[in-house]
Image (cartoon, rainbow, N blue to C red):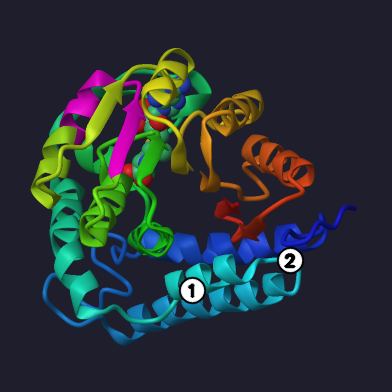
Amino acid sequence: MYQRPGGYSDFESPRVGLLAFALDYVHKTNFVEQASPIYNFKQGQPLDRVERWQTVLLQIYLSALLSIQRGKGLTDRAFEVLRESVRLGMTEAEKEVLLPVVRVREELSRNDDEFEVEDFGAGSRHHKGARTISAIYRTSAIPHWWGVFLFRLVRGLRPQRVLELGTNMGVSAAYIQTALDLNGSGGKLVTIEGDTGLAELAGRNLAKVSSSAVDIVAGRFQDVLVPTLQRFQPVDMIFIDGHHAYDAVLNYYKTISEYTAPENCIIFDDVYPWTLPVRRAWDKIVRSNTTGSVFDTAKFGILIQ
Ligand SMILES: C[S@@+](CC[C@H](N)C(=O)[O-])C[C@H]1O[C@@H](n2cnc3c(N)ncnc32)[C@H](O)[C@@H]1O
């Protein structure tokens, strides 16, 4: 059993993960995903009592985790940014800028057009072959609450260069880009997607939420990551949400680390205890990383330098 400042012991991790999964599952299955747990509106209607409770539970869970992990080596800066990222309720400015994102989510959730996607092996086990857009959306796009979390990390850390691995239809990118827009400091997003059809669809979705040009690179991570980093460095924030295989995650982390700014934030999605390859890679990264702060929500694994 290991214990690293900011991380969980092997014993704690499955229990925390189970809770994270339960809450995430409730959000995913309960259409709130399409609406907005902390946005406090569902297609213009206030959330019902159950939905409000789900939202409050998730936020209590994350706030409690944050308090536990504060004692395990989070820096004051990381703690402040994370505390702001998990706070309850939304400001008027957040509601205004995220409304178009919620609308795009609603559109995608109702779009039953067939869509053919390429197979990236371990990278896209959820959606190879022909499926409807709404089905791909349900299995691949980040749940709304976690999107708001990402949005707030971008607001708090104010990165100038953000890189995303795994664009899919551009849902997570929409939260990142709208936060960069609101920051108003000219921050840029580059996002990589292997499937050219998805990359094009993402471009159309992103144009609905932001007037900024998002740079969508169509290509396999294995082929385009290094050239992308060479032209877009140093990167301040990276969101890794694709190709969930052990060696791949470690390799991408190692490659990206050579191109990061001294103060940076790397977010790994899906570090649940039972998505073993990603969890094992994340555990190894946390063990080898002796500087900076770690916040492990058992869904997002976050490293802040
Ligand atoms: C879980 S989805 C990303 C979801 C997106 N970040 C969101 O929340 O809206 C993962 C995406 O990564 C892409 N992908 C997986 N492995 C890849 C690889 N090796 N190269 C390029 N893209 C890959 C898949 O095509 C898929 O669209």
Magenta-drawn stretch contains 200: yes
Residue at the spot x=49%, y=68% of the render? 81
- Identity of the residue furthest to the top in this view: 223
Q: Secondary structure at mark 1?
A: helix
Residue at the spot x=44%, y=69% of the render? 85
Q: Is residue 229 above or below residue 219?
A: below
- Place of residue 180 in the rendered image (x, y in percent of width and height, measured from the top left): 27, 53
The disc, 1 or 2, on the residue closer to the chain's N-terminal end is 1
Residue 85 seen by the camera: yes
Q: Which residues are magenta?
A: 188-202
Q: Which residue is mark 1?
A: 58
- Place of residue 136 in the rendered image (x, y in percent of width and height, measured from the top left): 30, 38
Q: Amino acid at mark 1?
A: Leu
- Say which quarter of the image contains residue 99: bottom left
The one nearer the camera, 100 or 34, is 100
- Place of residue 274 in the rendered image (x, y in percent of width and height, measured from the top left): 66, 46
Q: Which residue is mark 2?
A: 73
Q: Relative to 269, is 76 on the left or the right?
A: right
